[in-house]
Image: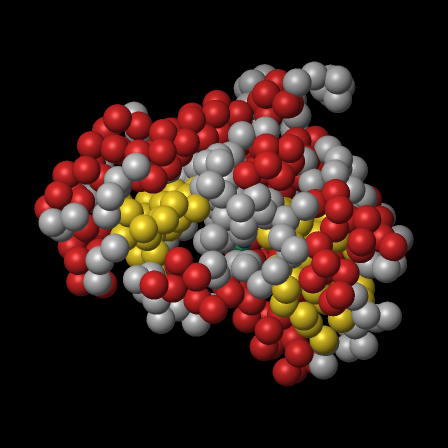
Amino acid sequence: MTDYSETDFSTRAIHVGNDVDKETGAIRRPITMANCYRLPDDASALNWSDPNNLIYTRTTSANQIYLQQRLASLEGGEDCVVLASGVAALSSVFFSFLDKDSHVICSNVSYIAVYRLLNEYLPDKYGIEATLVDTSDLDAVKRAIRPNTKLIHIETPGNPTTTISDIAAIASIAHQAGALLSVDSSFASPYLQQPIALGADLVVESLTKYINGHGDAMGGAVIGSKELIDKIKTEAMVNLGGCISPFNAWLIMRGVVTLPLRMERHSESAQKIAEFLESYPAVSFVAYPGLPSHPQHELASRQMKLYSGMLSFGLNADSETINQFVNALQVITSAVSLGHDESLIVFIGADDERIDFYPEAFGKHGFLRFSVGLEHPDDLIADLKQALAKAGL
Ligand SMILES: *Cc1c(COP(=O)(O)O)cnc(C)c1O
């Protein structure tokens, strides 16, 4: 296979992991929907759980391997493991690198499943110690270190506040303490942020979001050194069973081709919309890393190529009026998830279980998390305007 290692990100997003199909000459590798692969004539020496050998689809599949090659290249890591969802990828990291005597530090703004796993299930069931801190505050991270700290897990930008944590600085805090740093980079994608180059040991991506980008497949990935990824494959992939369907791996392989173009457009549109919202009288706040008003705007400018398509904002209105606004939207869809081609918005009320972890403005009337899609930004702004007007705002 051609060596693409010296080529640009956009070239690797198209070519790494693809090859001409040997049997048919097709220029795209096929979807291999098979649960298992023919064994060698002499299988006596076979490791039945080898996570890098095609034996059984839970222990790896052809399409999974191709996608792993592409994602390892895009993240600048040695190896990658692809699993069924972002949460499967996150729990594989916790399962592989935490044990009953260990301590983990985690961003207090993180994906809800991470919060539940680290705040509740892992401590209660397995005695793992966890400290949730504001990881945009480096002193708070340092203070949280204990002799048994094995892992620091940060999410940057954080979902849903877009809080930015300093990857390079936290990597050095982690390494001084003999701990690993894992970074959930799902809000940025590898096109906008390269945690491994900044010193992270592991990058976690929800492939469901920007990397697939089309809202039609779920997946998750962890990227890092061969040694760390092999441990995850051997322990958590083979034995926890969160394997990805070859069909979904193929869809994601197709989706990621256009990641660079999509991230440029998402970021450009989100900037315009954030500026529009910030100037609108009924809007109480806008959290978007591309705005100079964002508390970590400068850090985001250093750490990210662009500011991505995710923003949160508040309206000076009661819940009923905010619901009226959401229901009046015509182009933008009210739904969870993010990073899709189409714009998605979700209203999260002030009764959210983690509202106390968010900046104060989020708790006043609740907030709207907006995943700015690839529609024309003028159409999105027009849609926001007419829905604000219909809600009397
Ligand atoms: C959605 C999301 C996840 C979880 O990914 P799934 O594919 O839904 O399991 C993890 N982290 C972040 C930041 C996310 O937005």
| Observer-nearest of 47 and 330 | 330
Residue 301 position in % (x across, y down): 59, 33
Asked if 126 appears above or below 142 in the picture, the reply is below
Asked if 356 appears above or below 271 in the picture, the reply is below
* Observer able to see residue 259: no
Asked if 265 appears above or below 226 in the picture, the reply is above
| Observer-nearest of 94 and 274 | 274
Relative side of 89 to 328, left or right:
right
| Observer-nearest of 156 and 13 | 156
Give the colour scheme of this rendering: secondary structure
Residue 281 position in % (x across, y down): 24, 43
In which quadrant of the rendered image does the N terminus lie?
A: top right
How many numbered markers are drawn?
Answer: 0
- For the point 44% across and 66% down, the residue is 355
Relative side of 295 to 77, left or right:
left
Residue 149 position in % (x across, y down): 80, 67
Asked if 16 appears above or below 50 in the picture, the reply is above
- For the point 59% across and 29% down, the residue is 305
Relative side of 33 to 60, left or right:
left
Relative side of 267 to 295, left or right:
left
* Observer able to see residue 136: yes
Residue 243 position in % (x across, y down): 60, 54
- For the point 64% across and 36% down, the residue is 303
Q: Quadrant of residue 193?
A: top right
